[in-house]
Image (cartoon, helix red, strand yellow):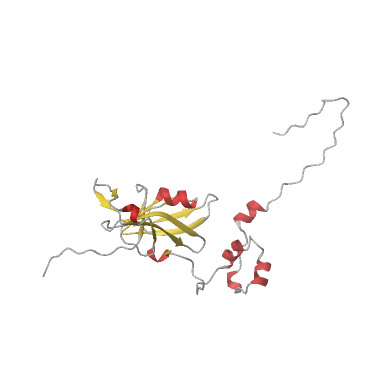
Amino acid sequence: MVAARYHIADNEWHPDTGATHHLRNNANNIHVFNDDDNNHDHIQVANGAGLEILHSGTSTFSSPSKSFMLKQILCVPNINKNLLSVHRFCLDNNVFFEFHASFFLVKDYLGNILHRGPLSNGLYTFFASLAHLQPQGLSSIHVSAQLWHRHLGHASFLVINKAISIAPRNKLPSICSECQLAKSHAMPFKHVHVSVLKPLELIYSDV
């Protein structure tokens, strides 16, 4: 029997409300830039230590409903966990997080859920498989009718069905929240017959 220290590679991203930048321990799936500008730069971590920054760059996350930008990623080889700065992620993608006991949500400001992530070993986790550099030209992923509905400017299902062959099991939900907000109409005003005898007897005011 031999007792030895070992390191299990963790390629997942973990949302961190205390991180000012996205920190990653390798440059995989990162578009690297400003390589020379980061020489001898360090990032200070929670215990006060300064860890060397080798590269900086950008990347993206893709979910079924949205692609998220990851800007100002710092490649820090000596960090054990890949940290996703909640502040910078929200700022760059115009979203917000909801943390629950066993999962977390990323939502837009209309309240739509854009991503749901699990709690794994006590840490909230974005799976590394979601990260990529560029959208693929061809994909075998089945796209839902709801996503086509959004991409085509919230067209009706009849229009989508004529343009794209979609299986009947993927019909649109009966209610689309964005359509309800954007396409709603004001109720008609009641017909009121009022007669006046002199000026300023009846005043209309926009309140």
- Could you tell me which residue is drawn at 61 percent across and 58 percent down? 176
Looking at the rendering, in which quadrant would you find the C terminus?
top right
Furthest-right residue in view?
Answer: 197
- Could you tell me which residue is drawn at 58 percent across and 64 percent down? 146
Q: Toward which corner of the image does residue 117 lie, by quadrant? A: bottom left
Classify 135 as above or below 89: below
Q: Relative to the observer, which residue lies in front, 105 or 15?
A: 15
Classify 194 as above or below 168: above
Relative side of 5 to 202, left or right:
left
Residue 15 point in image, percent of width and height: 37, 53
Relative side of 140 to 119, left or right:
right
Residue 174 point in image, percent of width and height: 62, 62
Residue 89 point in image, percent of width and height: 43, 52
- Could you tell me which residue is drawn at 51 percent across and 52 percent down? 108
Q: Toward which corner of the image does residue 163 lie, by quadrant? A: bottom right
- Could you tell me which residue is drawn at 35 percent across and 57 percent down? 35
Q: Relative to the observer, which residue lies in front, 11 or 35?
A: 35
Relative side of 38 to 200, left or right:
left
